[in-house]
Image (spheres, helix red, strand yellow):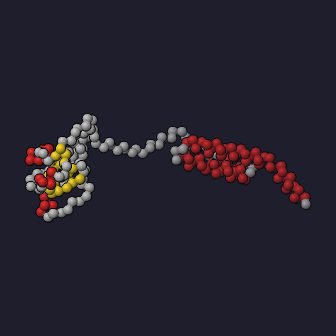
Amino acid sequence: MQYWINHKGVQSGPVDLEGLKDMGLTSSAYVWHEGLTDWVKITQLPELQGYYEMEPVVVGTPVEPVVPAPAAEQPIETVAQTARQPEAYEPEQPATGYGMPAQPQYEAPVQAAVTEPCPPTNLVWAILTTLLCCLPAGIVAIIYATRVTSKYNAGDLEGAKRASETGAWWCIASIILGIICQPFMSLITMMAGSV
């Protein structure tokens, strides 16, 4: 009778009883031959007593090892033999215990709902200070005023508050610079008119 062996992750066969003696099999080997519906442990076949050695059982490890798929393809003897040969034995994994741990489920971060109203943009003040007081400082105030709404809509309430406060400070700076520079501008205009 011809046997197929799956021992320590290596599948081989077909071999006869004489070939089994030279393989150095242990009790963890799986065997299949014509007439069997699936792979069985070598210890379950009475005719193979004496063709294997018992493996010691280590406490704390599973008794039945997982037999992986064959590492390399075996040579094809005949079409008839290959048609009858079963697939590599893969025992079912237990629901708990030695199986692979479950993959963690990814959860998208939930954005906290913004409950506070949008801070003031100060856009009107920024435009007025740009036109009436100091052009450079007013432009900076307009830039910060336009950032307030976009940051608020993105859920960045703290960023919107900072942009509103910074824009307000640039409006104040534009007014102060306008007040300081106005007498000098009037003086320059009067001197240019007298020439």
Where does residue 54 sit, x and y in percent of width and height? Answer: 18, 42
**Is residue 89 visible to the viewer in this orientation of the structure?**
no
Judged left or right of residue 100, residue 13 is left
Q: Nearer the viewer, residue 65 or 175?
A: 65
Where does residue 9 sit, x and y in percent of width and height? Answer: 24, 51
At 68% from the left and 52% from the top, the residue drawn is 139
* Image quadrant in which the C terminus is located: bottom right
Where does residue 20 sit, x and y in percent of width and height? Answer: 15, 52
At 64% from the left and 51% from the top, the residue drawn is 143
* Image quadrant in which the N terminus is located: bottom left
Total marks in image: 0
Judged left or right of residue 73, residue 129 is right
Q: Nearer the viewer, residue 60 or 104?
A: 60
Q: Nearer the viewer, residue 192 or 88?
A: 88
At 85% from the left and 55% from the top, the residue drawn is 188
Q: Residue furthest right?
A: 195
Q: Residue furthest bottom?
A: 79
Q: Nearer the viewer, residue 51 or 134?
A: 51
Write down the quadrant of residue 58 in the picture: top left
Where does residue 117 sit, x and y in percent of width and height? Answer: 55, 40
Judged left or right of residue 27, residue 175 is right
Write down the quadrant of residue 70 in the picture: bottom left
At 40% from the left and 44% from the top, the residue drawn is 107
**Is residue 175 visible to the viewer in this orientation of the structure?**
yes
